[in-house]
Image: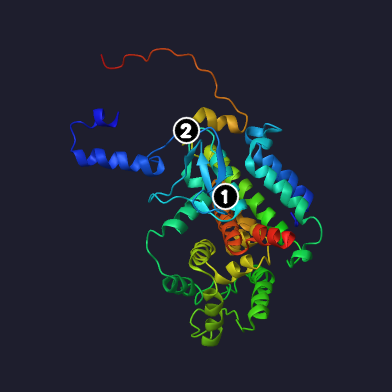
Amino acid sequence: MATKSALTVYKRLIRELSPNNLLFSYRSSPIYLKIKDDYRRYRPITSKYCKHTDEVLFVARTYLTYLESIRTRKIIHSTYSKGEKTVQQAANIVGLELPKTTDRPHLPLNE
Amino acid sequence: MNTLLFRRYSPCLIRLCARSSATNFGLTNRDRKRFYKQASIVESSQSPSKYEILLDQRKLKTPLGNLVTIENEFLALALAQEWNQQEKKIDLSSMHMNSLINTLIDNPLKITKAQLIDKIMYFLDWDTLLYRSDYPEEFKQLQIKSWDPILSFINQQFHTNFESTYYLDKKDLVKKSDRDIIEKYLANFDQPSLTVVLFIVEQLKSIFLTICLLKQFQSVENIASLSRLETEFQISRWSNVEYHHDYELMDTCSKISAAYLIFYCLNNNITQTVLSKDKA
């Protein structure tokens, strides 16, 4: 992924801010207003405030990286920390199923 | 309720439990469920222009009991967002900004600025970018392609002459004059910023990559993958193991991006200066 543009960063930030993929719930987070205001304020040439180009955009991209990596780490942790798979689950990964056996009591060998 | 459970134990244990819940909600001890509905920021009454975090009307404190006050509004909002993002259980291991800010305010190991600079300079003599491997040939080309631009950027910024080597027994690869230049650059920052820089250096194992990040030369993902170049090369040869490689990459990315955000907010209080310029 090459450097993301300001608009894509903004869209992905909003998606990260809405918990559990509920759209429009990002409005309740206090940082949303700050991001919106900062985007409006720094949209004209950033050199007006003596900052080199894309400096504030770098901070926005870094914050997006932070939120996304935290979420991905949680997903990886929850996926792979369940312990070993049973034979049934391991077969299910490739789409196979264990054959059905009829349960009969074992023959009494030493009686 | 605590007194009923611990009636048989010594009274000092009761005092210890009561004290821990008074300072930071007893968070360090066990899994706590999310006990607040909303985390928000508020301007502090004692020192105006500093922000504090409120968890449902209760002020947030560090593990040592100090009040968390932050000068930069964006940083305070990001902290509140971190607390808001906890769903049912509070997962302190994923809240890197919170733990870094706690360390900055508390300074529990009582480290001085000179000790911090020493610790950071320790990473310079054996910097990853300087010691290269010349076998296999593809990896050698990959190192030259990825790491040489970083070295030339550093040399250009600081007027130094860092060179890489393929041997492990070369003495004095880093000249004293170059070392002093980097040390002087680091001495410009104040102690909280240096704590953050040390944290980043320990994650990346390289001072040059840290300086590139601080000067915004490359994005955070690029820096993280540059620091684990050999791992990436092996992944391209022998394929990726998601629960180890990706987990490690996400861990590094999240830690250094949180640290960089704190560093930027400590050293560039843009909101304040911009407002004063507009009003004047």
- What sort of colour scheme is used for the picture? rainbow
Q: Which callout, 1 or 2, points at the residue further toward the start of the chain?
A: 2
Q: Amino acid at mark 2?
A: Phe
Question: What residue is drawn where x is 41% and y is 37%?
Answer: B31
The residue drawn where x is 52% and y is 78% is: B183
- Front residue of B47 and B65: B47
**Image height of A75 relative to B230, above or below:** above
- The label number, if any, that marks residue B165 in the structure image: none
Residue at the location (38% across, 39% down)?
Answer: B30
- What residue type is disc 1 on? Ala
Give left or right: position of B122 versus A96: left
Q: Answer yes or no: are tags 1 and 2 on the same subunit.
A: yes
- Secondary structure type for disc 2: loop
* Residue at 68% in and 75% down: B153
- Quick one: SS at disc 1? helix
Please state the chain letter of the residue tagged with numbered disc 2 in the rendered image.
B
Chain at numbered mark 1: B
Query: Which of the image's four quarters has the N terminus of chain A?
Result: bottom right
- Within the image, what quadrant is residue A93 found in? top right
Neighbours of disc 2 within 10 Å: few (<14), some (14-19), many (20+): few
Q: In this orientation, which residue lies closer to the viewer: A3 or B19?
A: B19
Q: Is residue A16 left or right of residue B58?
A: right
Instruction: Give the spatial CA distance, label 1 vs label 2.
Output: 20 Å
Residue A77 location, x and y as percent?
52, 41
Find residue B218 and report its image quarter.
bottom right
Which residue is more in the foreground, B153 or B3? B3
Residue B35 — which label?
2
What residue would you read off at disc 1?
B76
The quarter of the rendered structure image containing the C terminus of chain A is top left
